[in-house]
Amino acid sequence: MLNKRLTGIALAIAAVAGSLAVPGPAWAATPAVEITKVYYDSPGTDNRSNSSLNAEYVKLTNRRSSAVNLKSWTVRDKASHVYKFTDFRLAAGASVYLHTGKGTNKSTDRYWGSGAYIWNNTGDTAYLRDSAGKQIDSCSWGKGGGYTNC
């Protein structure tokens, strides 16, 4: 009888202790870099001018307190258009805009170099993968208002 009682008490203590377990750090579930906005339908007429192409972009944000090197990370769409980062460090808390068209790369803006639109206005998905090919984040949308916050 005493053994059953002790077993019952031990199980109750284990259940309470399990419910009081301290969760891991909140950042553990948050990707180091996230897709925070996609402007998939540039304003005005889609005339493939470089300014129109560059009004289409993906915004990536570093959520960590230290820089992240995006070398060999990729951004892609459902149709497998792929942009691959060269040696590029995204500062802590900073964002970078990946524009579809051509331009001069800077710390806040990178350029895909495409002469055609990448993101479908009627719905698409942007995927962010690290240098090992592991999916870090994604953002999907349907037909809508031209951009989506992720």
Image (cartoon, rainbow, N blue to C red):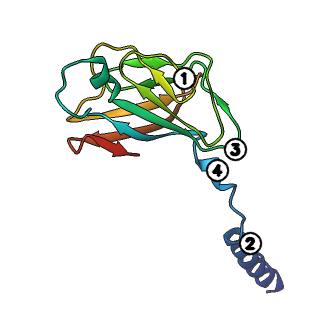
Q: Compare marks 2 and 4 and give the one earlier in the sequence.
A: 2
Give the camera-side residue of 110 and 142. 110
Provide the secondary structure element on which disc 1 rests.
loop
- Position of 60 relative to 101 (above/below): below
Q: Compare marks 2 and 3 and give the one earlier in the sequence.
A: 2
Horizontal and vertical percent position of residue 121 = 22, 33
* Separation of marks 1 and 3 at Cα, in angstroms: 21 Å
**Which residue is denoted by mark 3 in the rendering?**
65
Horizontal and vertical percent position of residue 67 = 68, 34
Q: Amino acid at mark 3?
A: Ser
* Separation of marks 1 and 4 at Cα, in angstroms: 28 Å
* Separation of marks 2 and 3 at Cα, in angstroms: 32 Å
Horizontal and vertical percent position of residue 23 = 68, 61
Q: Which mark is residue 17?
A: 2
Q: Amino acid at mark 1?
A: Lys
- Position of 5 relative to 91 (above/below): below
Horizontal and vertical percent position of residue 38 = 37, 37
Q: Which is more foreground, mark 1 or mark 3? A: 1
Q: Amino acid at mark 2?
A: Ala
